[in-house]
Amino acid sequence: MENDSIRSSGADTLVEIWIEGKLRSVCISQQAIGAYVGFEKASGMSDRDRSEFVRAHLPLIVSAAKAKLLESNLAADNVVIDVDDLPRDDGAKGNRRKAERRKTDRRRSNQPRGALPDRRRSDRRQGERRSPPPKQD
């Protein structure tokens, strides 16, 4: 990628890239970068640091831009990526669950279940499955 295709403009970082067969301008806000890396870290980032972040996370930014294009206008030349548009690896956006749903280990234990036999070790069918057909005279 060329050096001048990623540049900072104020609090935003601009990228010109081919998406879906068209050259588009993608604007990534400082708040979007802050929501991804943490606002404390993003507030101390220089223009060059934000440009390097965009360069390092270009596939993520392209996928976010494609998602924005699908939900709004496929023919748009400019795409603005804001706070909630960059999906995070830890699932903070889009995943409502904060913890694992399953609280216990669901693997099968080696201990017997009391006086009950394990159903998988006994014969499942004790008799005929269907009644015998009536005899033909």
Image: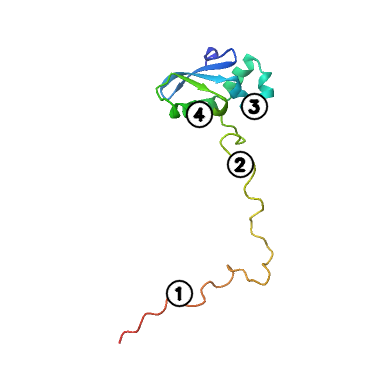
Say which of 24 and 78 sits in front: 78
Question: SS of the residue at dot 2?
Answer: loop
Q: Residues within 10 Å of mark 4 (few under 14, many from 20)?
A: some
- Quote the CA–CA distance across marks 4 and 2: 23 Å
Task: Mark 2 vs mark 3: give the one in front.
Answer: 2
Image quadrant in which you'd find residue 99: top right
Of marks 1 and 3, which one's residue comes earlier in the chain? 3
Residue 118 image offset from top left, x and y in percent: 62, 68
Q: Label 2, on which residue?
A: 97
**As shown in the figure, which amino acid type bears the numbered disc 1?**
Arg
Image quadrant in which you'd find residue 60: top right
Q: Are marks 4 and 3 in contact (CB under 8 Å)?
A: no
The C terminus is located in which quarter?
Answer: bottom left
Question: SS of the residue at dot 1?
Answer: loop
Task: Mark 1 vs mark 2: give the one in front.
Answer: 2
- Quote the CA–CA distance across marks 1 and 3: 62 Å
Residue 19 image offset from top left, x and y in percent: 45, 23
Q: Which mark is residue 66?
A: none
Of marks 1 and 4, which one's residue comes earlier in the chain? 4
Q: Label 4, on which residue?
A: 63
**As shown in the figure, which amino acid type bears the numbered disc 2?**
Arg
Of marks 1 and 2, which one's residue comes earlier in the chain? 2
- Quote the CA–CA distance across marks 2 and 3: 20 Å
Q: Which mark is residue 129?
A: 1
Q: Residues within 10 Å of mark 3 (few under 14, many from 20)?
A: few
Q: Label 3, on which residue?
A: 37
Of marks 2 and 3, which one's residue comes earlier in the chain? 3
